[in-house]
Structure formats: structure tokens, C-alpha cells
Amino acid sequence: MKKKPAQRSVQWFGRQDIYGFIYRSWVKNRGVPQDQFDGRPVIGICNTWSELTPCNTHFRILAEHVRAGVLEAGGFPLEFPVMSLGETLLRPTAMLYRNLAAMDVEESIRGNPLDGVVLLGGCDKTTPAPLMGAASVDLPTVFVSGGPMLSGKYRGTDIGSGTNTWSMSEDLRAGRIKLEEFHEAESCMHRSHGHCMTMGTASTMASMVEALGVGMPGNAAIPAVDARRNVLARMAGRQIVQLVRNRIPLSKILTRPAFENAIRALAAIGGSTNAVIHLIAIARRIGVELSLEDFDRLGRGVHTLVNLMPSGKYLMEDFYYSGGLPAVLRELGENHLLNKEALTVNGKTIWENYKDAPCWNRDVIHGVKAPFKKNTGIAVLRGNLCPDGAIIKPSAATPRLMKHRGRAVVFENIEDFHRRIDDPGLDIDASCVMVLKNCGPKGYPGMAEVGNMPLPPKLLKKGVTDMVRISDARMSGTAYGTVVLHVCPEAAAGGVLALVENGDMIELDVAKRKLQLLVSEKELSRRKKLWRKPKAPLERGYWKLYFDHVLQASDGADLDFLVGKSGAFVPRDNH
Ligand code: FES
């Protein structure tokens, strides 16, 4: 039988020269015995722990469980930190730094003596960033999500991260609740370790991890503080050692069929629109062509099965107790909506993992035959306002607004919006279309989650709950409304969005996938001549690099020179 080539780490630790001395000796300084350098798989534990990322503050414990698993399976664990991105504290938006964190992960993996890696992520960007970086190296990889927080509990009702933040903020602005109630809810909403417990971006991305097969079964929904989350981390630690021994790189898991499964799962869970950008970016790192059209084509006809905020009423804890993502994937598989042969990191196919998954509560996880909401996959819109695409999440929108024609009320940027939205004299009514410019990748910069613009108080007080809103921004996965997002090209890149003026008529027709600015070509070209390209927001550093190289949302908003992979090869020794 042909002998397998030595592990990659042997190029460091297996050397019997001065380099071997250097590579081993310093590692021994914390009591590592010589036998750990005998060629066993060296496993990196890539940790996005940070107190500046509240959703990931339990990750040191999680990493210890991964470490235990690696040791049990005969591997050699080495934990390392990478840049962490917290949605709630980091300004101007964590998305600005997703690609920077991905670079950190990529180079940390490639430059070190690692044979495989376990990635720990939770808060929104801490899932796509490590996956993008790891994909560009393509070693065996397992992802472990940190898990959602326990359900928020407020005055006898469940409240969800983000979703109830938006609704209570609107209630406060409309004078329906008092400031004391608002403050009380702050303490009731986030009461345990973990990430947002609605089906926001973090839970969506944890579900994508499981649907892609790059996480262990159960990854999506086990609460952060449930002992079974630690068991999952430990099993992941054991399993990564097997993946290294069996030479199964990430590209064997992240295949085109795996991404198709993820897209359908995204529709079935009513997941965050942010997943569209992240999945395209991850796919293009590993060499899988994925486009906006794939989301529309594959998601079309897939129903939302999961009754979770922001599309429904339950929370991630309920989802887990009802069967979690396994029950959803079984439904998809039984209805010919799953590529059953896709390989997962536990060594089994996705169908082997989920074909017998039980569902314990059909009010939380509906079946395909009696779905929670029908035909709600993410819709991709085209038209003169978004020739390169825009998206809308029908499951979170108001059905009667899905076909709508209205007068544009334009906000030139987020400051303009904040300055004018509360003005009782603002010329706006419920039939208007709110348009926000210059919040895309280059414009903000970083494409902030400001697309779900709060409604004007004067309309809130009249009982208006939703209006059509259009922007080149993103929206928090916990938000809702008839909100058109990711307009491409963005205003700051010279898209037609930049040319919209107050009073223009805009037509939205989601069924026909149309978004049209009803202004003549002649008038638009006149306005285009007057348009001036914005300057980079900062003339140096990462902001400049980002501004000069970021791709549009339809291409995953990666930096142009980061698309693709370079593999795990490092040419030279370091001394
Ligand atoms: Fe971290 Fe929502 S703020 S997941």
C-alpha cells in the first residue's frame, strides 16, 4: 500500500536541524512533552473570543472542550486568537472589517504548523470571516458555533434580540411605552452567554454552517449555555483529527451541492439577507461559482418552515427543543430539496445525518405540506434602479406592499436621514417609498445595517407599521419590513440609486422581480453628468484599502484580490 505523505506540520516539528530546534523548543516552554512532536495531527483552534464581542465571551470554555476532543483523538491542539468582530460595539460597522478578519485567519493558518483547524464563531461576522479565511487555505476544517442565548424574558413574555429592540424602539418613538420599560427590557433581553437568539444573522450563519456540512449535527441551535454545546465542541475536536488523518480538506465539504443545500435551508428558516453576501464570498474563496440568481432560482418555491422571529414568533431555544435544523433538513430531503450525497465533517452524508431527525413541535417547525409561510425564499430584483441586483426577504415583508408604486422620499446619507426623519414637517405619507443612499460597501463604508430605516414618528402615531424602503445598505437579520436591500451598483459607485430625487416615482413588483425608477433615460443621463464620485473616507490604512478594492454586494463584498485561494504552501523558513 502506498504510504501517505507526512502531515504538513512535520515540515516544522519533524525537522532534525536548527529549524526543528527552533520550531519545537519554544513550544515546549509551557510544558509540552517531546512526544507531541511525533507527527500526530496538529490542530489549530481559531478563537474569536473577545470581551468586545459580547456574543463570543464564553469561547475560552468552548475552546477547552475542543482541546479535550483533539487530545482524546490523539491530536496536538494549539489555540490562537484572531480579530473578533462584535456587532454591537464596533463602529462604523463590523462588516467593514469582515475581510480584514478573514485575512488574519487565512495568514494565521497558512503561516503556522497546522494540519487542520477548528474555527470558533458566533456573533454575525465571526462566522463568515473565519470560513472565508480558512477556505483560501483549504486545510481540513470544522466550524463550531457558540450557540444562541437563552430566550429573553420580559414581563411574562418572550422577547428576542434585535427584533424586539426595533419594535420597542418604535413603540418608544410613537409614545406607546415609557423610557423605564425600555430600560427594563435591556436587562431582560440578553440574560446568558451566546449570540442573538432570533433567527438573525448569527443564528442564520450557524444554520448555514450546519447545512453546508462544515459543522457537526446540532450546530445551529443548541443554546450556548446548554451542556450539549460543549459536547458538540468536544466531538468537533475529535472529528477534526479524523478529517486530518483521512485527508479531507474543506473543499471536499464546501462543494456546489453543499451551497445549494445551504441556500434552500436559508429559505426554509426565513434566514437573514446577510447570508446572501456571506455565502457568495465563502463560495468564491473555495472556488465554487455562486451568484445572486442561484438564491432566487433555488429558493423559489421553498417555503418558510420555521416560525421564528423576525418572520414568526418563537426563538432559537424553542427551535432547538423542537428538533432544530436537523428537522428542517429532513423536511427538505423528503421533498426533493436537498442534495443528499453532500459530505459533512462527521464523515457521513447530509442525508445519513438527518434522515431520521425528529420534530417535536409542529408549531415551531412546520412541514413542507403545511408551511409557516409560502414561497418566501429571498427574491432577487432587477430593473434600472438595480441592474446588478437587489434583494428582498418576503417572509419579513408585508404582502400588500410587495407590489407597490410610490413617490420617492430621498435621504442622501444616514446623517441626512437622522436629521430629517423625526421632523413633523417631512413631506411623506404611508404610500411613499423611502430611499437611502450612500450606505453600501464604499459609501458607508462597510455597508452598514441601516436599510430597515425606522419609520417617521408622525406616521407611526397614525398606526402605520410598514413602508417600502430601498437602499444600498444591509439590514440586521433580526429586522423586518418591506425593505429592498443591497442595491447594486451602490450609490457611491455611481449606481442609478445615486440619481434618485425627491418626487420620482418608483415601482416595486416582487412577483415579477422588478424594481424600476420611473424616470426617462434622458433625464437620468442628465443627472449622471452632474454626479461626482465620492472621495475615500480615509486616505490611509485599512479603510483606504477597503474603499479601493471592495466588490459590490452581488459579488460578496470581498476585496477583489482576496477572491479565490492560495492553498497551504509556505515557501521559506523564518530564520
Ligand atoms: Fe452578536 Fe447579534 S449582536 S449576534
Image (cartoon, helix red, strand yellow):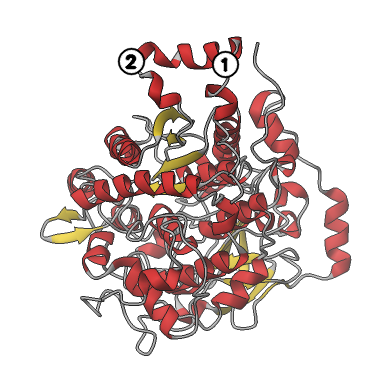
Q: Who's the residue at 42% across and 44% down the image?
A: 241
Q: Who's the residue at 83% across and 56% down the image?
A: 527
Is the residue marked by circle 2 packed among few (<14), some (14-19), or many (20+) residues within 10 Å?
few
Question: Is residue 405 visible to the viewer in this orientation of the structure?
Answer: no
- The residue under label 2 is 31
- The residue closer to the viewer here, 110 or 406, is 110
Whether 482 is drawn above or below 500: the answer is: below
Q: Which mark is residue 4?
A: none
- The residue closer to the viewer here, 417 or 447, is 447
Question: Is residue 51 visible to the viewer in this orientation of the structure?
Answer: yes
Position of residue 229 measured from the top left corner of the image (x, y, whole percent): 26, 50
| Cβ atoms at labels 2 and 1 below 8 Å apart | no
Q: CA distance from mark 2 to mark 1?
A: 20 Å
Q: Who's the residue at 36% across and 43% down the image?
A: 237
Q: Could you tell which of marks 2 and 1 lies nearer the N-terminus?
A: 1
Amino acid beneath label 2: Gly
- The residue under label 1 is 16
